[in-house]
Image (cartoon, rainbow, N blue to C red):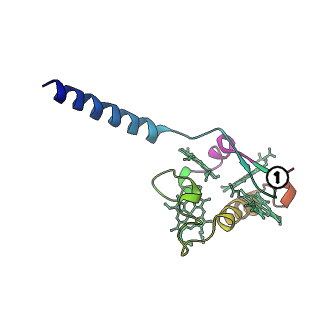
């Protein structure tokens, strides 16, 4: 009986954590430190106001882009995926398109 209660408590805990994860908007600001290209500071919160989650996170989950891009050779590489997504929208809607607009030393 005691074991059963512990098990139920564990299940309840896991279920609530999963709910919290679904409601998670992620970090407000994401700093990407690169080997040679300085730091790209991505204002996630401001961008969330610009478009729907699914426009950038084209999957149901919110995994890191690099968990697929750069892992599976059939999927475009991480750097190209970022550049394509970031720059295409910036060309269309008016964000920085020059290297130094994103890559700050
Ligand atoms: C303009 C594009 C864009 C929009 C819109 C956007 N995100 Fe993101 N989000 C990103 C990028 C880029 C990252 C960083 C991913 C990485 O580090 O590989 C990220 C990271 C995250 C993370 C953290 C993932 C991790 O494991 O570190 C969560 C959670 C998340 N986003 C949720 C959301 C939710 C919820 C919305 C909608 C309310 C949203 N995002 C809208 C681009 C976007
Ligand atoms: C769960 C795996 C997965 C995650 C996580 C993921 N992608 Fe993708 N992505 C794919 C697959 C699969 C394709 C389609 C194959 C291809 O185009 O090479 C794709 C395609 C793309 C494309 C090309 C679309 C086109 O029009 O050609 C871009 C750009 C892109 N992803 C950016 C991102 C960014 C930015 C993130 C993080 C915010 C991200 N992806 C997260 C799997 C993923
Ligand atoms: C859905 C469209 C869209 C996507 C995708 C997008 N951006 Fe933007 N971004 C914008 C727009 C629009 C602006 C201009 C907002 C403004 O000036 O108020 C902007 C502005 C910026 C700025 C300048 C902010 C400032 O304070 O001047 C940076 C840096 C930036 N984006 C980085 C990124 C990066 C990095 C990515 C990819 C991970 C990305 N953006 C993806 C639409 C987008
Ligand atoms: C709209 C923003 C933006 C612009 C404009 C931009 N980049 Fe990037 N760049 C990024 C992001 C985001 C990444 C990926 C960061 C990561 O992998 O975490 C990246 C990654 C890179 C990388 C890989 C660095 C490494 O150490 O992995 C190189 C090289 C690079 N960019 C060169 C350039 C050059 C050259 C230009 C100008 C022609 C440019 N970028 C313009 C956002 C931008």
Q: Residue furthest top?
A: 2
> Any magenta on residue 44?
yes
Q: Is residue 24 left or right of residue 98?
A: left
Please name whichever residue, 90 or 41, is drawn nearer the observer in this view of the structure: 41
Q: Residue at x 17, y 24 (%)?
A: 2
Q: How many labels sit on residues?
A: 1
Q: Would you place residue 60 above or below residue 77 in this image?
A: above
Q: Is residue 88 left or right of residue 10?
A: right
Q: Residue at x 57, y 50 (%)?
A: 52
Part of the protein shown in magenta: 41-52
Q: Would you place residue 1 above or below residue 87 in this image?
A: above
Q: Is mark 1 within 8 Å of ligand 4?
A: no
Q: For numbered disc 1, what is the local secondary structure?
A: loop
Q: Is residue 46 left or right of residue 6?
A: right
Residue at the disc numbered 1: 38
Q: Position of residue 34 (x, y in %)?
A: 75, 54
Q: Position of residue 20 (x, y in %)?
A: 44, 35
Q: Residue at x 69, y 42 (%)?
A: 46
Q: Is residue 103 left or right of residue 25?
A: right
Q: Would you place residue 55 above or below residue 31 in this image?
A: below
Q: Position of residue 17 (x, y in %)?
A: 40, 35
Q: Would you place residue 81 above or below residue 64 in this image?
A: below
Please name whichever residue, 33 or 51, is drawn nearer the observer in this view of the structure: 33
Please name whichever residue, 10 or 12, is drawn nearer the observer in this view of the structure: 10
Q: Residues within 10 Å of mark 1 (few under 14, many from 20)?
A: some
Q: Residue at x 79, y 49 (%)?
A: 39
Q: Position of residue 7 (x, y in %)?
A: 23, 32
Locate the N terminus and report the quarter of the image it occupies.
top left
Please name whichever residue, 69 or 90, is drawn nearer the observer in this view of the structure: 69
Q: Residue furthest front?
A: 3
> Any magenta on residue 50?
yes
Quadrant of residue 91 within the rendered picture: bottom right
């Amino acid at each position: 009986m005691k074991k059963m209660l512990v098990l139920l408590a564990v299940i309840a805990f896991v279920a609530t954590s999963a709910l919290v994860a679904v409601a998670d908007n992620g970090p407000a600001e994401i700093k990407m430190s690169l080997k040679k290209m300085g730091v790209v500071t991505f204002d996630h919160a401001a961008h969330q106001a610009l478009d729907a989650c699914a426009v950038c996170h084209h999957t149901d989950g919110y995994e890191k882009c690099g968990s697929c891009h750069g892992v599976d050779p059939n999927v475009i590489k991480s750097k190209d995926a970022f550049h394509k997504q970031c720059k295409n929208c910036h060309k269309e809607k008016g964000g920085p398109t020059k290297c130094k607009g994103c890559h700050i030393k």
